[in-house]
Each structure stands twice: as structure tokens, then as C-alpha cells.
Amino acid sequence: MSRCIGHPISYPRAWSIAVSFEFGVMASPGGVDGAAIRLGFLKKSGISYVHGASLLAADVFIDMLFFISIIPFPIASLLKYIPLDSLSGNLSIQWLALLLIPVPLYAWRKRIFQSLEKQQTYRKHRMGGRLRLARRNLTHGFRQGQNAVTLIFKNHRGLLAINFVLAALQFTARYSILPLAIYLLGTSVNPLPLIVMQGALFMISMLVVAPGGGGSVEVLAALALPRLIPLNHVGVVILLWRIFTYHFYLLFGGIIFTRTLKKLI
């Protein structure tokens, strides 16, 4: 992507920045420090903040395009896996409710914000203004990413296609960890519904103002997984899953972040 805008950086440097970005996402509340780390390291590598922000927005936009393109398949598989006549069971209702949590949160966002504005702590830290600023920045970033992708598509269609394939490989690898952990314990499970579950859990973890979701991911996964696997396997599966999708980034990513920071300072 950096070569597309005329500022090529070496593959080892790009890889170090990418891993450091993941470390920042995992180690900060809501993943807010990831973008700052990436933009700062790109600046130290000769790419301006404006171009760095465009690359970040374009990268996120491509990830969204890929996720949107595949989401109908896991949803269709989920509807087949949990037929409507089976929703009378408590576990089925809990599991389906977990996947639908983002929907009522978005639908009732105005009422939620009105209730929060009455809280003294909310007013003290000016959270209303911060949320409005974050929403405006998100909208601006999306449009900026769309424009960057459009510009790159006109001049570098082949590289954009390669980036889309790389995004597909990354998502496939990341979302295959949970099904693989389940499979290693001797349980066969359809991986497609797990994509929806992991996506919903990731969104919830970003909304919780604590690194890694503050334990909310583990708790919600413990409520959802018994619908798919034996109850005595749930704890081990969650442990393996979070080691490779969260704790590994903190440990290994922290080492890469420190080494990259020393080289760029």
C-alpha cells in the first residue's frame, strides 16, 4: 500500500509496524492506541500523517469490504444451524441473543446517550463531546478510506487486488483459531457460525472501555459456546483461543513494538 502512494518501505519495517499496530489495539481501551502507533511509526519511516491516515483508512475499508462480502454465508449457515423451531431452548436463546446484541445497542443509541448524559461522571469527563468527535472522525475516516481506495484502484488495481487477498488470508487465519481449538479437542463444528460470533464479540470488546474487553469476551463466549461444544470443553477452548488472539499479541507484539520503537527513535 505504501508503494501505491510513492513512499515504499521495506517488508521487515512494514511487518514490524503492522505487528506493533496489533499490539496497540490489544493493549489499549477500545484499541485506540493502535492507530496512533501505526501513524507514528509511518511518520518515522518517511510517510506523512496525511498519507499514513489515508493508508490506514484504505486498509480498514478493504477489511470491511471483505467482511461484508462473506457475512451472508455465515449468517445463512447460522440460520440452518439454529432452526426457528429450536429457539425454545435456553441455550439457543442466549446464543442468538449474544449475536444480536449490537442491533439493540445501535437502535437504542439515542436513549442510551440521553441516560448517560444524566450521569455526573459522564458530564465531568465530557464524554458526550468525545463521542461526537469520535463519530465524526469515524465518518471522515470512512470517506477518506473510500477516496483512497478509489484513487489506488484507478492507478494500482493489481496491488489493490493483492491487498484484498492478503486481507482475506488474515481474516481466515484469525477466525480459524477458534474452530481449530475446538477441533483439537475432538469436536467437529461448522466454522461459519463462529465467524459471526467472533465478529460480534470483537465489536463488543471495542465498546468496553478496557484493554481486551475487560473480560467481557471470555464471559460472553462462555455463554455462547455450550450451544456448539460440550460444556467441559468450553474453558479449555476459550483459553486456547484467547492465548493466540489476545495474549500472544500482548507478549510477542510488545517485544516487536519495543524493538521497532528503539530503531525509529
Image: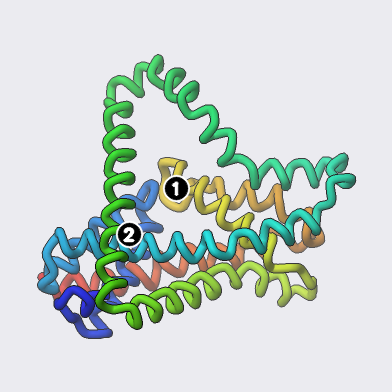
Residue 236 visible: no
- Give the x, y percent position of residue 216: 55, 46
Disc 1 is placed on an element classified as helix
Q: Which mark is residue 24?
A: 2
Measure how far apart labels 1 and 2 are at the Cα level: 13 Å
Residue at the front extreme of this rendering: 154
Q: Tell me which colouring the rendered structure shows.
A: rainbow
Quarter of the image containing the N terminus? bottom left
Could you tell me if the residues under marks 1 and 2 are in contact, i.e. CB atoms within 8 Å?
Answer: no
Residue 43 visible (yes or no): yes
Amino acid of disc 2: Gly
Q: Relative to 258, say whether 108 is above or below.
A: above
Q: Identify the image quadrant of residue 42.
A: bottom left
Identify the residue shown where x is 48% and y is 62%.
Answer: 246
Tell me where residue 43 sits by quadrant: bottom left
Taking depth in this image into account, of 62 and 213 the one nearest to the observer is: 62
Residue count near mark 1 (Cα–Cα under 10 Å), binned few <14, some 14–19, many ≥20: some
Instruction: Tell me if 37 is positioned left or right of 61 in this view.
Output: left
Q: Between 162 and 232, which is closer to the camera in this rendering?
A: 162
Q: Does 205 sit above or below residue 71?
A: above
Residue 16, relative to residue 26: is it above or below?
A: below
Question: Which image quarter holds the C terminus?
Answer: bottom left
Q: What is the secondary structure assignment of the residue under circle 2?
A: helix
Q: Nearer the viewer, mark 1 or mark 2?
A: 1
Left/right placement of residue 250 relative to residue 102 reads: left
Instruction: Look at 54% across and 31% down and name the residue there.
Output: 107
Residue shown at 46%/62% (left/top)?
A: 65
Q: Which residue is mark 1?
A: 206
Q: Amino acid at mark 1?
A: Met
Instruction: Point out residue 242 in the picture as x, y percentages from the top left corner.
Output: 55, 63
